[in-house]
């Protein structure tokens, strides 16, 4: 039950950190929208994140789900069937996808198509087509056709032919099995009672529960009855009498990136905008006085510092001001630009009409926002101001530094910064250890010598999880570039994750460079170089990276082993412009010397939430690759500002990863260029521009 307990713990943390709309529908025991054991065609709000733990007699199921797109829902699940006679418990991971074909509308029902355990030979493999219809307020009927587990009673025969045999149980697509073999009908009813949050359900399931019957489960009836109660918008408790012989229960948690837990307008309000008087003096002689400029910059620096914004470079003329700024606190970059704009509109002499504002990201100037003062004066506090200001703002690729005479540059003094935050690597996909309850605290520190040049380090310590790891030496035929990773954490309270000297710079207005040297990650030290072409107004970016590394010693963090390798990738980044979806393709050589490619798909929300899924295939055979046949995983980034009543740029990362294999393992370099640049590109600023006036 260890993985179930941790699932509940993690889900509670998700619920505590998230906000979300109440949902009328329930999650079934597989973590999908459904009744008790069966699916429905009801939908969750776009972006909804869910976590569940449920049990029927000896079967436990834990899941994490996400409404990937308005019509696509995905689930990752770990299942365990305990007390199998003559052997240990049977554990399996599962991946589900569900597609909403039709939304309920008038007389039309909602219709969904689903694939359950569609990779490999999961014990719950099934496919279904299901329809749901609210016949009267609060009463919903569901009916469908199922294959695989849901075709157990074969009431419809084999409408599309025989189901293919399992040719590879290690996590590959097997198209000759989907919607094949025995098919059966299923159905159910749900009633939302007058008691707030209480739903009653009954269903007819053709699932024969053959795998569970081998462990003593008695399927005495195809009927299930139960109830679900939601005390609030984020928690749901379910209980049921299942198949005429067993009690089942589930606890479910939900939250939504689109609904912040903490109000986003708390704290110090923005400066007021006062339009210049029609007879305001427009003379520019003041700009020729160095003392006037120094006094003006000093006053600006003091006001902006209250919002955690510092002036790195500045140039003032009689009609314009150019600013290169360091934003240390405000999470939404558009809000930072808006705060600066308001201050300039209030404080600058009347003759200054053009504001050129550039935010630096880790020393890199990315995008310059050119804003006309007269536009700001006309738009403030008016309906549609956010859209109007976005349309009137001109974005260009920032230069490496402000050009021209009379540029103020902040004296470069070494600057020290530090931070502490959690990383949550959830090994949801390891069938041996189940949910590994890992919570890792990372302490970071950076010493910046000049813009772009710094030394940084990171220490980590597991506060939960090290004592529960199964640590063993890998038997992989490939170089052990990842499969021995647990050995690097075994026996130490604190680990050196990285210690590097880094230099990031602009080669041209839309061309960036990075060089890093030192302890690059937990298992490798060496040198890493990278270039990135990323025009601010383009949806496409191109990058290249080359690394030479040697494997670190397991016992001494500063010693090296003999294994070394040259790795590198060519990368294509594409912002689709659709629902915040981004695609990334990396092709090249991996740490074990294998060649291949990684495809990543991510969805970013305007407030900084991001969910990313990736899969890697290389020229290593499936037999040598190890568990799972190819590298895959899911990562989630949650901005703390979304759940905290104060401004912060800190984030929490959760990683849902499989057992780490040596094939398809990429060097884990921190601070790659695209991650630095995209936070300030046109798409990111556009999506978050509603915060400009906050």
Image: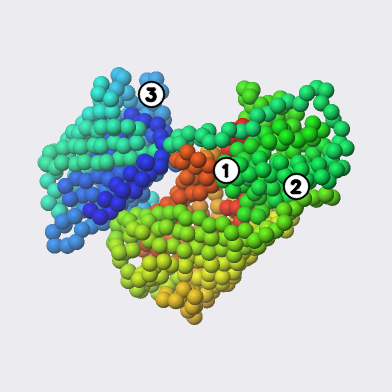
Q: Which residue is painted at 64% across and 61% down in the image?
A: 414
Query: Who is closer to the viewer here, 315 or 429?
Result: 315
Is 398 located above or below residue 378 in the figure? below
Query: Is the C-beta separation of discs 1 and 2 under 8 Å?
Result: no
Is 692 located above or below residue 649 in the figure? above
The x and y percentages for residue 179 are 33, 44
Q: On the picture, is 91 further left or further right than 269?
A: left
- Find residue 336 and report its image quarter: top right
Q: Which image quadrant: the C terminus? A: top right
Which residue is most to the bottom? Answer: 562
Q: Which residue is painted at 61% across and 33% down in the image?
A: 270
* Numbered mark located on residue 330 in the image: 1
Mark toward the start of the polypeptide (1 vs 2): 2
Q: Is residue 69 visible?
A: no
Q: Secondary structure at mark 2?
A: strand
Residue topped by disc 3: 108
Query: Who is closer to the viewer here, 29 or 213?
Result: 29
Q: On the picture, is 267 further left or further right than 390?
A: left
Mark toward the start of the polypeptide (1 vs 3): 3
The x and y percentages for residue 542 are 64, 55
Q: On the picture, is 223 further left or further right than 262?
A: left
Residue topped by disc 2: 314
Local packing at callout 2 (Cα closer than 10 Å; few below 14, some 14-19, many 20+) is many
Q: Secondary structure at mark 3?
A: loop
Q: Which residue is painted at 58% across and 38% down in the image?
A: 688
Local packing at callout 3 (Cα closer than 10 Å; few below 14, some 14-19, many 20+) is few
Q: Label 1 to label 3, Cα distance in Å? A: 46 Å
Is 672 located above or below residue 579 in the figure? below
- Find residue 350 and report its image quarter: top right
Q: Label 1 to label 2, Cα distance in Å? A: 20 Å
Query: Is the C-beta separation of discs 2 and 3 under 8 Å?
Result: no
Local packing at callout 1 (Cα closer than 10 Å; few below 14, some 14-19, many 20+) is many
């Amino acid at each position: 039950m260890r993985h179930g307990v941790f699932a509940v713990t993690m889900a509670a943390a998700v619920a505590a950190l998230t906000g979300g709309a109440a949902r009328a529908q329930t999650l079934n025991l597989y973590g999908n929208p459904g009744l008790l054991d069966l699916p429905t065609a009801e939908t969750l709000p776009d972006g909804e994140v869910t976590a569940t733990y449920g049990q029927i007699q000896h079967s436990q199921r834990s899941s994490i789900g996400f409404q990937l797109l308005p019509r696509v829902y995905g689930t990752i699940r770990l299942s365990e069937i305990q007390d199998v006679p003559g052997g240990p418990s049977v554990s399996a991971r599962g991946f589900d996808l569900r597609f909403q074909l039709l939304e309920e509308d008038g007389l039309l029902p909602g219709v969904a198509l689903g694939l359950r355990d569609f990779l490999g030979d999961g014990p719950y493999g099934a496919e279904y087509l299901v329809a749901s219809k609210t016949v009267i307020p609060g009463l919903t009927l569901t009916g469908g056709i199922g294959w695989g587990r849901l075709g157990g009673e074969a009431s419809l025969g084999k409408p599309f032919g025989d189901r293919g045999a399992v040719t590879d149980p290690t996590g590959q697509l097997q198209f000759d099995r989907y919607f094949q073999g025995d098919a059966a009908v299923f159905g159910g009813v749900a009633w939302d009672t007058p008691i707030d949050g209480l739903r009653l359900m009954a269903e007819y399931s053709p699932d024969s529960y053959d795998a569970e019957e081998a462990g003593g489960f008695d399927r005495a009836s195809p009927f299930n009855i139960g109830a679900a109660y939601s005390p609030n918008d984020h928690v749901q408790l379910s209980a049921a009498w299942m198949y005429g012989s067993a009690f089942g229960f589930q606890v479910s948690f939900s939250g939504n990136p689109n609904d912040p837990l903490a109000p986003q307008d708390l704290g110090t309000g923005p400066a007021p905008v006062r339009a210049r008087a029609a007879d305001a003096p427009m003379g520019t002689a003041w700009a020729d006085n160095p003392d006037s400029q120094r006094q003006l910059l000093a006053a600006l620096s003091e006001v902006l510092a209250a919002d955690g914004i510092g002036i790195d470079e500045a140039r003032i003329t009689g009609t314009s001001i150019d600013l290169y700024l360091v934003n240390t606190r405000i999470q939404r970059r558009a809000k930072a630009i808006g705060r600066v704009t308001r201050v300039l509109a209030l404080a600058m002499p009347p003759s200054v009409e053009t504001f050129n504002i550039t935010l630096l990201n880790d020393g890199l100037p990315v995008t310059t926002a050119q804003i006309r003062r007269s536009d700001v004066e006309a738009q403030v506090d008016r309906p549609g101001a956010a859209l109007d200001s976005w349309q009137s703002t001109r974005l260009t690729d920032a230069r490496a530094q402000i050009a021209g005479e009379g540029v103020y540059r902040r004296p470069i003094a070494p600057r020290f910064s530090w931070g502490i935050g959690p990383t949550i690597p959830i090994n949801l996909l390891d069938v041996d250890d189940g949910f590994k309850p890992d919570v890792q605290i990372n302490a970071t520190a950076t010493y910046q010598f000049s813009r772009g040049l710094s030394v940084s380090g990171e220490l980590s310590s597991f506060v939960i999880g090290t004592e529960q790891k199964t640590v063993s030496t890998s038997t992989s035929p490939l170089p052990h570039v990842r499969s021995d990773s647990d050995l690097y954490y075994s026996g130490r309270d604190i680990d050196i994750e990285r210690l590097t000297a880094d230099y990031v710079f602009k080669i041209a207005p839309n061309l960036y460079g990075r060089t890093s040297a030192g302890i690059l990650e937990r298992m490798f030290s060496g040198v890493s170089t990278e270039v990135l072409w990323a025009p601010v107004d383009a949806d496409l970016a191109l990058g290249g990276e080359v690394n030479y590394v040697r494997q670190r010693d397991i016992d001494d963090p500063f010693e090296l082993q003999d294994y070394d390798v040259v790795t590198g990738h060519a990368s294509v980044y594409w912002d689709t412009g659709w629902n915040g979806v981004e695609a990334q393709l990396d092709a090249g050589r991996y740490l074990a010397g294998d060649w291949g490619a990684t495809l990543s798909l991510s969805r970013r929300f305007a407030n900084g939430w991001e969910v990313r899924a990736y899969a890697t295939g290389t020229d290593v055979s499936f037999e040598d690759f190890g568990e799972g046949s190819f590298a895959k995983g899911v990562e989630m980034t949650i901005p703390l500002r979304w759940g905290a009543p104060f401004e912060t740029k800190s984030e929490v990362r959760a990683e849902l990863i499989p057992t780490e294999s040596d094939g398809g393992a990429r060097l884990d370099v921190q601070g790659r260029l695209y991650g630095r640049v995209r936070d300030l590109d046109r798409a990111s600023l556009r999506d978050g521009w509603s915060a400009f006036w906050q």
